[in-house]
Image (tube, grey):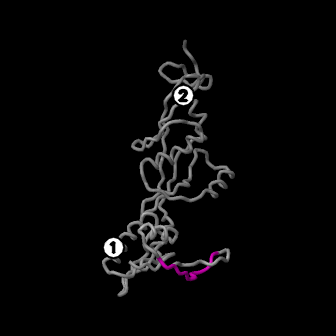
Amino acid sequence: MQRICPHCGKANDNIAFVGEICLSCALERKQQSLPSSVSIVRCPTCQRLRTNTNLNRSTKHLSQRYDKKALKTKEEWVNYTPARIKEIVKKPFEKAKMPGEYDIELGVWRGFFDAGGERAAYTWPIEIKWENNSCPRCSRSTSGYFEGIIQLRGDKKNIEKYAQKFAKKISKDSFIAKVVELDEGVDLYVGSKADIPKLVRYEGLKFFRSKTISGERRDGKRLYRDTFLIKV
């Protein structure tokens, strides 16, 4: 039995229907809730992606409620992978309850409608807008920022061995701002001090920790730089 779309008048000859309406009209109904593009912020130095991405919807203006929510989003930077890109693009479609998958090569969302047992496939073009913005880690590393100093003292060979070990492990989550070679040993200036004690203990070493004031935060609390003296 031939069906006719009540919205556009098209018959079901060679066209897909979603329930009682044709696929084109079904997409037209959903287009305001689907993104026409996704802006992804990428660090030009380390190529990591910022996950609180702006979703540019097909409507001209985002709601005030959406803007406030975006401002409260916690900033997080993750490694660039095709899977990450798919995750970012997938979020607005999940919110609109439009299942499917992002095709990176063709730049389209491959989705489907499922209504009344009828399944109709469709594609929706998505433009990826890349925005370059340095992540906090890279911004700090280029500005000479550091929170802690690892002072390696002792046998010259051991100093060299542990300096390489610490630098490699620290670079995974933080950075080495600079390395200073002295007659008595090596000083590693580290971007984040948080994981230094755990790292040192993991190597079976002990340390002597001292603090120096480096400034104040906006709320008046003092900032400290920690020095970790390690004998190897």
Residue type of the residue flagged with mark 1: Lys
* In the foreground, 172 or 28: 172
Quarter that holds the N terminus? top right
Q: Main secondary structure of the magenta part?
A: strand
Residue type of the residue flagged with mark 2: Leu
Residue 142 painted magenta: no
Outermost residue toward the left?
157
x and y percent of residue 118 in the render?
A: 54, 23
Labels 2 and 1 touching (C-beta < 8 A): no
Residue at 51%, 57% in the rendered image: 50
x and y percent of residue 123 in the render?
A: 48, 35
Residue at 62%, 78% in the rendered image: 222
Outermost residue toward the bottom?
183
x and y percent of residue 180 in the render?
A: 39, 81
Q: Which residue is mark 1?
A: 161
x and y percent of residue 53 in the render?
A: 54, 53
Figure check: 21 above or below 51: above
Of badges 2 and 1, nearer the viewer stands 1
Figure check: 39 above or below 161: above
* In the foreground, 220 or 182: 182
Q: Which stretch appears magenta?
A: 207-217
Figure check: 195 above or below 4: below
